[in-house]
Image: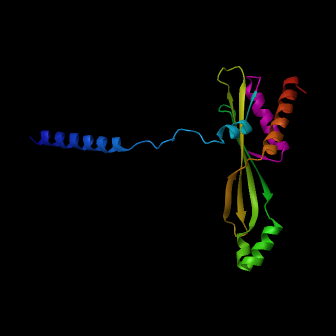
Amino acid sequence: MTIYNRFLKLFFAIFLCLGISSCASVPKGFLVPSKDYLEKRQLQMRQYDTTDQEKIITSVAGVLQDLGFTLDASETQVGFVAASKKADATNVGQVFIVALLGGANAVGNCDSSQVIKASVIIKPSLDSKKTVVRVTFQRVVWNMRGQINRLETLKDPALYQKFYDSLSKAIFLEAQEI
């Protein structure tokens, strides 16, 4: 009888868990992409008429270095390149206004330095006749106290255009072995 009681308790517990979890529903629009998704995707992605991913990874690494980035990681088998560069984020106007309104203690919250990070994914297209490259640029901004003020994805079209213009030239030169 004890085995039967254990089985009955286990069955009841499983039935209760399934009953509770089935009451939860997926929020409306959960899988619907945001309105700016397509625009952001078009900004970040390009296709190239080659299937040689190693040449594209080499070109991506060269372009990032030409743009002042230091390579942090590169996985040719996976098609991933990560790079970063440090830059000054001090804005004299911001420091002046914060000092004027908040006093000397508030100046420590002003932007001081930043690191711009680039992440590049290289993969074959769906038909496997082209290669897709997607780059994202993020920045981490620290204040004068050494705390993170902001973490954001950069959406400047000129930045992405400069990267892809340089990459197109590098891929062409790599293909011509120049």
Query: Image quarter for residue 61?
Result: top right
Report the residue at 84% width, 24% height from top.
175
Regarding residue 37, the answer to whether it shows in the image is: yes
Magenta stretch holds residue 54:
yes
| Quadrant the C terminus occupies | top right
Q: Nearer the viewer, residue 147 or 26?
A: 26
| Quadrant the N terminus occupies | top left
Give coordinates of residue 67: x percent, y percent. 84, 45
Q: Looking at the picture, does residue 140 appear above or below residue 160? A: below
The segment highlighted magenta reads 48-72
Magenta stretch holds residue 53:
yes
Regarding residue 74, the answer to whether it shows in the image is: no
Q: Nearer the viewer, residue 157 or 109?
A: 157
Q: Nearer the viewer, residue 124 or 34?
A: 34
Q: Looking at the picture, does residue 165 appear above or below residue 144? A: above
Give coordinates of residue 63: x percent, y percent. 82, 39
Q: Looking at the picture, does residue 153 appear above or below residue 135? A: below
- In the image, is 173 to the left or to the right of 32? right
Give coordinates of residue 145: x percent, y percent. 70, 70
Q: Looking at the picture, does residue 84 appear above or below residue 31? A: below
- In the image, is 174 to the left or to the right of 118? right
